[in-house]
Amino acid sequence: MIRWVAIAAAAALAAVDASAATKMTVGNVTSTSSGPLYIAKDKGYFAKAGLDVEIVVFESATDMAPLLATGRLQIAAGAVTVNFFNSLEKEFPVKLMSSRNTSPTYHNLLLRPDLVGTVKTPADLKGRVIASNGRGSITTYEVGKIVESGGLTLKDVDVKIMGFGQMPVALANKAVDAALMIPPLMEIAVGKGVAVKWIWADDIIKAQPVVIAVQQINTDWAAKNDAAMHAYMEQIIRGVQEYCEAYHHGANRAEVVDILSRYSNVKDKDALEKMEWGSRDPEARVFEKSVMDVQDYYFQEKLIDKKFAFKDLVDDRYRAAAVKKVGPFKLVHDDGKPGCRPDSVANR
């Protein structure tokens, strides 16, 4: 009888704890660099911190912007898009909180195999069809910088908008000539023989280190749930440190590969083991030079009407506090690969 009462009491306490957890909805564009989010969710870090985190998958950060602005998402994890700047101009409660994918990003402009030898330089892209995952997405910036290096503008190419998952089919059917893709789907397209790696976006972009993807927050929700936001960012930093160790083929590599296989769109562990993963800054910093260059490009292309000071784009409180609480990242196994390092975020 006493044992039954104890069990019943424990169950009741667990139910209370579960109901007391702060619910958060995180929009996410699936990629290997989403690893820290998956780690924190899978290993129960969020739950232990009193958070009930739901991850909702989107094709593009552009699709998340209106949901974040209106509070239906509390956090949006994806690229720095035109919609973010437009939301700020409309005075919606959004800010950048931390970086998600930094140099080396391993974003590549893939080329159809039959065009190798014909399309040799960015200048040869004139009149060609290029796939991008969202109008006004960061891939617009990356494609724009690549064609600029060949003396072209976006008006000189035909940009087709489609999800990353559709791009391998479009390449195979010759519906597009090139596609700006990210890991892990980039590796799948190459593995199927429908594309070859051609131009690394990082090699073209001069504002280094590059910040391609970020975590954006709804600042109204954050202000009302300050403790929850601090707890969330702390668990993300823990996840980043574990991800970075695995990125460099540390002892936890197999564990993180297993997590990626269950949460990402690549289920093959062997494939995940062999492919390049997007890098993360261990402190999740939002690098000013890169973000301002993205903004300048969108403004130049008349995709946004107003530019903002960096201080008006970023709320760094949660990230800075989380890094201080978790402590510095110390890389145990160093395989010499650039990126995911405490001292610098090296370009490829």
Image: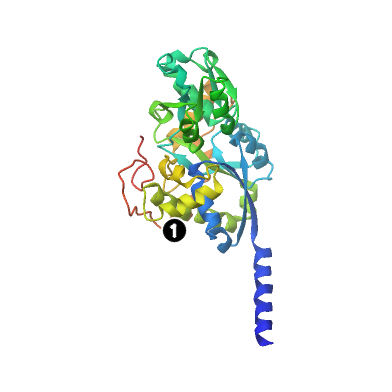
Task: Say which quadrant the N terminus sits in.
Answer: bottom right
Q: Position of residue 104 (x, y in %)?
A: 40, 37
Residue 243 drawn above or below residue 303: below
Q: Position of residue 341 (x, y in %)?
A: 36, 46
Residue 206 drawn above or below residue 94: above
Kindly identify the residue that appears in the image at 45 percent across and 17 percent down: 115
Would residue 221 be found to the left or right of residue 310 on screen? right
Q: Position of residue 301 (x, y in %)?
A: 54, 20
Q: Quadrant of residue 64?
A: top right
Residue 139 in sight here: yes
What kind of element bears circle 1?
Answer: helix
Type of residue at label 1?
Val
Would residue 347 be found to the left or right of residue 316 on screen? left
Q: Position of residue 16 (x, y in %)?
A: 68, 69
Task: Say which quadrant the C terminus sits in.
Answer: top left
Q: Identify residue for label 1.
A: 326
Q: Quadrant of residue 274?
A: top left
Residue 237 in sight here: no
